[in-house]
Image (spheres, rainbow, N blue to C red):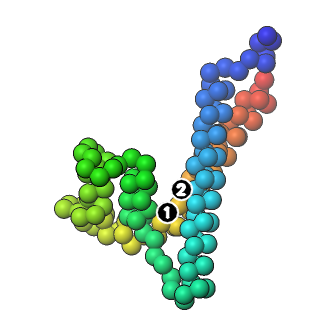
Amino acid sequence: MNTAARMSVLDILLRVARAAGALVGYGCLAVFLYLISLQIYGWFRDREWTHFGVIEGLRAALMRCCVKDGDSGRLASLVQWLDTPADWLGLHKVLEILPASLALFAISILGNSIYIYFCDRIDERDRTR
């Protein structure tokens, strides 16, 4: 195999980071659009805007994939804190009020920025070869 055609470990890491950025960026953008569509549909149908806070999104995601009833551990205690906080009450209030769609959009911008950054690094490495 030609040494110029071989990918170094750094090239592989750059491409993996670029793929992860794209997955986070475009995945969160798709979920953002889905969530906004649900809210708009509810508004048009019932004339009622349904608020989805970050708390509801975290709780639903953790209960769907990671925590079952009766579990113990860090994630189970996080779900318990999401339901009935005993401390960090200000953070809980912010996460309760903050729309999940806004948080998803911000994460999608961050993921897309990571994707663009690593695309630029890969292009820069390819130009110097």
Q: Which residue is mark 1?
A: 103
Q: Residues within 10 Å of mark 1 (few under 14, many from 20)?
A: some
SS assignment at label 1: helix
List the single residue furthest toward the left: 86
Q: Can you tell which mark lies on residue 107?
A: 2
Q: Could you tell me residue 33's position as x and y percent?
A: 62, 66
Tell whether 49 sits left or right of 69.
right
26, 70: nearer the viewer = 70
The amino acid sitting under disc 2 is: Ile
SS assignment at label 2: helix
Asked if 1 appears above or below 122 in the picture, the reply is above
- Whether residue 36 is visible: yes
Q: Are marks 1 and 2 in contact (CB under 8 Å)?
A: yes
Q: Could you tell me residue 10's position as x and y percent?
A: 62, 25
Asked if 1 appears above or below 8 in the picture, the reply is above
The amino acid sitting under disc 1 is: Ala
Q: Can you tell which mark lies on residue 90?
A: none
Q: Could you tell me residue 110's position as x and y percent?
A: 56, 53
Question: Which quadrant would the C terminus be assigned to in this image?
Answer: top right
The residue depicted at 60 percent of the width and 29 percent of the height is 13
